[in-house]
């Protein structure tokens, strides 16, 4: 175990998933693409009713799903945004790559001031530079990223940025942000795979714990997080891009595994993320939602649509 209490996850050149399967290699990517039978989904779904969040809340916790893994967290005195993406595509170019199937649930014009931006890793559907530049232009945001990611933001004049390893913490205006393990991988180019870290975060503020899992496979880290920091009042857990399982299981949970994680964490309420906006794997755009509703029937596990929110006391 490392000094931070989590397993070693860096070999001097690359980060890796400790005591767990690693992401599939390029040969398996080609095999997947050649044999893929992706579930058909509408090219665009026009069912989003955009909401207008308050500039600030006076009490309780308001959680709004903007889209994909972009969640607006509002508690008295602070607003936090996770993995923000407002772009049309999750891609390095504007003319190719996964295109959004639903609009953001909060328009850019109605986004309140953001105190803290949490970035879980550097994949294009989670670290969207166009959106980060727009947030920077609005001012007053602090950015928290995993190891190795700060250089990319600073090269785009996005900051201030704080870089964390698993087990490290950063004081912010709303309290403390703890960087915690995830089972995933990183990379934005062919030759930078796993050169930067991936993570989740636990936000500790006003005697409340909020867990944002980022992208992750199912694993023992959920029990480690609960043991180290306690059971979260709210857990944001990914449910999409899980098919085919032979390829995706080392890096993405399925809906049934998200329910298991919810139970291991003993979360007060869990909220599904990483679904409904981009089709990134063989599961259809709304299949994760249907599957979760079927297997979490008696659990406090919410599936919000883009723009929908829940308020917790």
Image (cartoon, rainbow, N blue to C red):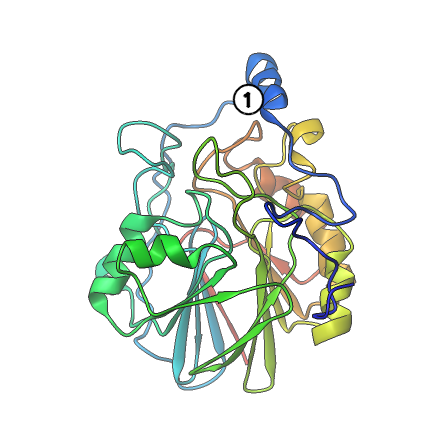
Measuring 60% from the left and 45% from the top, which residue is drawn there?
A: 14
Quadrant where the C terminus is found in the figure: bottom right
Disc 1: which residue: 38
Badge 1 crowding class, 10 Å Cα cut-off, few under 14, some 14 to 19, many 20 or more, is some
Measuring 57% from the left and 17% from the top, which residue is drawn there?
A: 30
Q: Residue furthest front?
A: 12
Decide which of 284, 92 is in the foreground and name it.
92
Residue 67: image location, x then y, percent: 42, 50
On the rendered structure, is 61 left or right of 152? Answer: right
Residue 68: image location, x then y, percent: 46, 48
Question: Residue 46 is drawn in which quadrant?
Answer: top left
Q: Residue furthest top?
A: 34
Measuring 43% from the left and 41% from the top, which residue is drawn there?
A: 277
* Numbered label tally: 1
Quadrant where the N terminus is found in the figure: bottom right
Residue 138 in view (yes/no): yes
On the rendered structure, is 237 left or right of 304? Answer: right
On the rendered structure, is 123 left or right of 52? Answer: right
Residue 262: image location, x then y, percent: 71, 59
Q: Image height check: is 43 above or below 212?
A: above
Residue 188: image location, x then y, percent: 44, 39
**Which SS class for mark 1?**
loop
Measuring 41% from the left and 50% from the top, which residue is drawn there?
A: 127
Residue 307 in view (yes/no): no
């Amino acid at each position: 175990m490392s000094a931070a209490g989590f397993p070693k996850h860096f070999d001097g050149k690359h980060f890796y998933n400790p005591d767990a399967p690693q992401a599939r290699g390029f040969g398996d990517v080609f095999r997947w693409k050649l044999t893929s039978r992706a579930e058909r989904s509408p090219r665009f779904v026009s069912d989003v009713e955009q909401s207008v969040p308050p500039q600030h809340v006076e009490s309780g916790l308001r959680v709004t799903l903007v889209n994909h893994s972009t969640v607006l967290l509002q508690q008295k005195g602070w607003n936090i945004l996770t993995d923000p993406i407002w772009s049309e595509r999750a891609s390095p170019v504007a003319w190719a790559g996964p295109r959004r199937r639903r609009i953001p649930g909060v328009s850019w014009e109605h986004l309140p001031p953001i105190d803290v931006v949490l970035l879980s890793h550097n994949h294009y559907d989670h670290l969207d530079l166009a959106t980060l530049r727009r947030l920077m232009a609005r001012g007053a945001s602090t950015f928290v990223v995993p190891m190795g990611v700060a250089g990319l933001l600073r090269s785009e004049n996005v900051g201030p940025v704080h870089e964390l390893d698993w087990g490290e913490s950063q004081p912010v205006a709303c309290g403390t942000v703890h960087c915690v393990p995830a089972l995933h991988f990183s990379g934005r180019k062919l030759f930078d795979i796993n050169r930067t870290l991936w993570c989740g975060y636990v936000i500790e503020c006003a005697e409340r714990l909020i867990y944002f899992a980022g992208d992750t496979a199912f694993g023992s880290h959920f029990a480690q997080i609960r043991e180290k920091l306690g059971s979260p009042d709210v857990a944001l857990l990914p449910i999409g891009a899980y098919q085919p399982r032979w390829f995706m299981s080392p890096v993405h949970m399925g809906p049934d595994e998200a329910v298991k994680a919810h139970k291991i964490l003993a979360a007060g309420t869990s909220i599904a993320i990483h679904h409904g906006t981009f089709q990134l794997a063989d599961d259809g755009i709304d299949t994760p939602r249907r599957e979760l509703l079927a297997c979490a029937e008696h659990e406090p596990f919410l599936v919000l649509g883009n723009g929908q929110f829940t308020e917790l006391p």
